[in-house]
Image: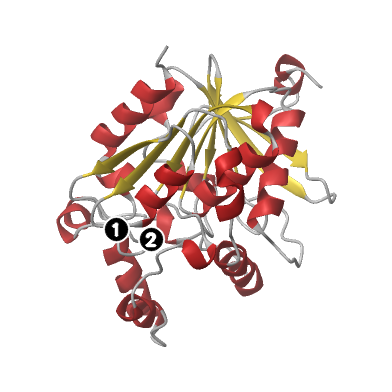
Amino acid sequence: MMRATAVIRNHERDLRHDQFVTRVPAPDGAHLAVRTSGAEAPLLLLSGQAGSHEWWTRVRADFDAFRRVVTLDWRGTGDSDAPPGPYSTQGFAEDAIAVLDHLGIDRADVYGTSMGGRVAQWIAIRHPHRVRRLVLGCTSPGGPHAVERSAAVRKALADPDPAAARRALLDLMYSPEWTARHPGPYWTLGDPTMSRQARHQHLLASNGHDAWAELPRITAPTLVLHGDRDDLNPTANAPLLADRIPGARLQLIAGARHAYFEECRDEASAVVREFLTAG
């Protein structure tokens, strides 16, 4: 594998965020935009559905202090290519492995939220030797065993008025009290530069996820983290994952909705840091 020091010399420095930026070839030849920051042992952060690296903007610094943080723009988002598809969580996992290979990273901690947590499951299942510790945030096993969002939530998100649908999604992500203090931008609502086709492919990939049968194969120490007021990806999915993955630890964030990692940043980041640095 190419070593990280060699790759960094080819990076373009992003002075706005003190990040190094590079483009990495995926297995099918598409190119993915990748950002690295921080130092020490590697930590791969995986964004949710329709999310670019900006998904992590508010909390990235919490991990830069003790990890070399790696993020990518999923295909179809940000500065990555947007091939026509089909997309899948398994395919996104192979994209992530290609990123680690290109950066010369043999083994990393992996923290995925929402759809990124679904992708992280496949990384840990298919490439167990590449994952040191695994954090699955606000995610689901998918398939018929998963707990689906309610009909009322689905109806609100499908509102034909785009502004109303956006308001519904914002309310599922954050409490009104938090949004009143934080006017945005809200990167968890999706990359605004995405094409309609790419956004649809992300939806299909997330909805098509089903790792239930394979979850017992995960060998990495695993933390399952979830807000206890998450109606977008119902909280009941968290114990399903924790019970299915051998030895997994479950922790709920009190009062948190889907974007617990932002709204409850201090608590959530501390929990993840403690888990990743445990002996």
**Where residue 276 sits: x, y (%)?**
43, 22
Tell me the quarter of the image containing the N terminus. Answer: top right
The disc labelled 2 sits on which kind of residue? Asn
Is 229 rendered above or below residue 121? below
**Where residue 196 sits: x, y (%)?**
60, 74
Q: Secondary structure at mark 1?
A: loop
Q: Which residue is mark 1?
A: 230
- Looking at the image, residue 210 sits to the left or right of residue 94; the answer is left
- Looking at the image, residue 146 sits to the left or right of residue 128; the answer is left
Residue for point 69% across, 23% down: 105
- Looking at the image, residue 236 sits to the left or right of residue 86; the answer is left
* Res 80 visible: no
Q: Secondary structure at mark 2?
A: loop
Residue for point 35% across, 68% down: 169
Q: Badges 1 and 2: C-beta atoms under 8 Å apart?
A: yes
**Camera-nearest residue between 235 and 59:** 235
In the rendered image, which quarter is residue 165 located in?
A: bottom left
**Label 2 Cα crowd, 10 Å radius (few <14 / some 14-19 / many 20+):** many
Is 64 rendered above or below residue 29? above
**Where residue 91 sits: x, y (%)?**
71, 53
Q: Which residue is mark 2?
A: 233
**Camera-nearest residue between 229 and 72:** 229
